[in-house]
Image (tube, grey):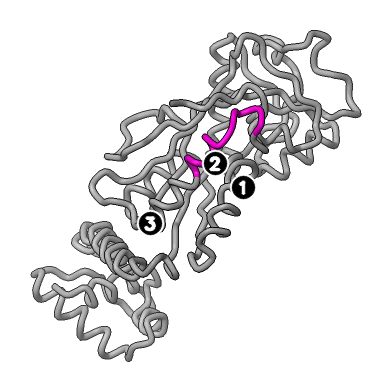
Amino acid sequence: MQLQQLRYFAAVADTRHFTRAAQRLHVAQPSLSQQIRALERELGAELFHRARGHIALTDAGEALLPLARQILADTDTARREVQEVAQLRRGRVRLGAPPSLCASLVPDVLRRFHDEFPGIELIIDEGGSQDLVRTLAAGELDLALIITPLPGQAPALAATELLREELVVASSPAAPPPTKARRIRVEDLRDRPMVMFRRGYDLREFTTAACRAAGFEPSFTVEGGEMDAVLGFVRAGLGIAVLPGMVAARSGLRVTPFAGHAMRRTIAVAHRKDVAPPRAARELRRVLLEYLRSADADDLPGLPPGTRLLP
């Protein structure tokens, strides 16, 4: 079994077309077909159902695909590790992060990293923590910022908790405040019109779970938005939203903290246990930790009061 054969197999699985796969890989279509036939002979099973105008994976192909992608990802990691030895003059880092962190913490960290290593390509994957964990475990990311704890059983990852962040209620400065008190309780969200993120956002699941624990279902006026859309809807007075403190501090919206630290989340940086992150990823992790520890939380841009760094 050759890496080239696995690469050809994965390309056909992605495109479901031999000619398009050959074009993507810049090889002759007959050569690609011959290599896949050779792979099938070696494995003793057909990997594709071949019909005119239709290519589909067989059961054997479905079983091989995640393994092939894992092998190719690990090979790519090994190749980059060797290339990056020369003082990190070239290479890349693939970082996953929830949209809320991409709108707050991540830009400042990436700016510092880019200033130190301008030749390293930065690839960012926005997504919910559960999706990022799966992508990280599949070898498609080097590092991921995730919200812990994760529901259910997570793959074998090494995670370091970085900080504990307060969630707050954001409202339009032009609208009446959500409460006359200095702080708001989760119970005060009952029957309040709320702007809610699309499904898959950690914040949606966190907020909904907190409301249900308080004995009620949240009331949505608008739902399904991404981070920028939610901020815009709140600014327009369509409702309030529960946001991370780091995002709310930069939004220009009215910020009302929760009473008694009722709503907090823990942010961690994770990587696979079985494969050491490439050197560039390790340097990005170092820059991230140095950024967070360079001063008290109240003095750092983007980390508002109530954000506590973890040891």
Asked if the magenta segment contains residue 290, the reply would be: yes
- From the image, which quarter does the N terminus lie in? bottom left
Q: Which x, y percent locates residue 88?
A: 41, 65
Q: Is residue 179 visible?
A: yes
Q: Which mark is residue 291?
A: 2
- In the rendered image, the vertical position of residue 182 relative to residue 279, given as above or below: above
Please give the name of the residue rendered at 62% of the width and 17% of the height, measured from the top-left corner.
217
Q: Which x, y percent locates residue 208?
A: 58, 23
Q: Which mark is residue 167?
A: none
- In the rendered image, the vertical position of residue 166 relative to residue 5, given as above or below: above
Between discs 2 and 1, the one toward the N terminus: 1
10 Å neighbourhood of mark 2: few (<14), some, or many (≥20)?
Answer: some
Q: Amino acid at mark 3?
A: Glu
- Marks 1 and 3: which is nearer the front? 1
Nearest the camera: 92 or 119? 119
| Residue range corresponding to the magenta coloring | 288-299
Please give the name of the residue rendered at 80% of the width and 32% of the height, measured from the top-left corner.
253
Q: Of helix, strand and loop, which one carries label 3?
A: loop
Between discs 1 and 3, the one toward the N terminus: 1
- In the rendered image, the vertical position of residue 116 relative to residue 6, given as above or below: above
- From the image, which quarter does the C terminus lie in? top left
Query: Disc 1 designates what residue?
Result: 108
Q: Which mark is residue 140?
A: 3
- Check if mark 2's residue and mark 1's residue have beta carbons within 8 Å: yes
Please give the name of the residue rendered at 72% of the width and 12% of the height, measured from the top-left corner.
184
Q: Amino acid at mark 1?
A: Asp
- In the rendered image, the vertical position of residue 6 relative to residue 159, given as above or below: below
Q: Amino acid at mark 2?
A: Tyr
Q: Which x, y percent locates residue 128?
A: 50, 41
